[in-house]
Amino acid sequence: MLPARHRMRHSGDFARTIRSGSRAGGHHLVVHLLLADPEQTDPTPAEPARVGFVVSKAVGNAVQRNLVKRRLREIVSHRLSEIPDGALAVVRALPAAQRASHAELRDAVDRSMDVATRRAQRSRA
């Protein structure tokens, strides 16, 4: 389960991350990642990374979508320490995610998250 403080809840955060974040994806999913603004030098502790999930009706019926969403949440919860503080991430499942095994989804998340992080850091520099 993804801890509540790491969940993205506001549609504005989703839109900003998808519009302005770095994107990486494959056959099963796409990851959009928006790193925190480095110019924000607030003395308060950094916000934790927050992650949102988009699983459309193209993935399948409600049972199939919820299964994909649960798998993705579990996979991402183990990667939270690797996502920079203050970052926003959106994991968007593609229709092929419905037929993917847990291991395939885990590999897709790992690969896409790594690529999106590298791209975001490179574009920030």
Image: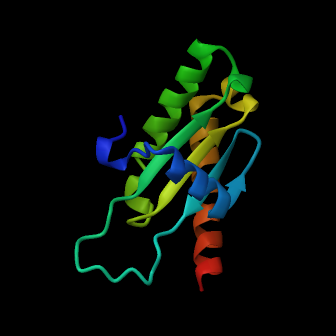
What x and y, as percent, mark residue 122? Answer: 63, 79
- What is the residue that sits farthest to the front in this orientation? 12
Instruction: Determine the image quadrant of residue 54.
Output: top right
What x and y, as percent, mark residue 60? Answer: 69, 18
What x and y, as percent, mark residue 29? Answer: 68, 42
Q: Residue at x 58, y 57 (%)?
A: 17
Q: Residue at x 60, y 22 (%)?
A: 65
- What is the residue that sits farthest to the left in this orientation? 44
Question: Which color scheme does this rendered protein use?
Answer: rainbow
Quadrant, the N terminus: top left
Instruction: Determine the image quadrant of residue 40.
Output: bottom left
In the rendered view, tell whether residue 55 sits above or below residue 11: above
What x and y, as percent, mark residue 83? Answer: 45, 61
Report the front residue among 46 and 9. 9
Q: Residue at x 60, y 86 (%)?
A: 125
Q: Is residue 25 left or right of residue 11?
A: right
Q: Is residue 34 left or right of residue 99?
A: left
Number of marks present in the image shown: 0
> Is residue 113 shown to the viewer in this render?
no
> Is residue 24 shown to the viewer in this render?
yes
Report the front residue among 90 and 80. 90
Q: Residue at x 60, y 51 (%)?
A: 15
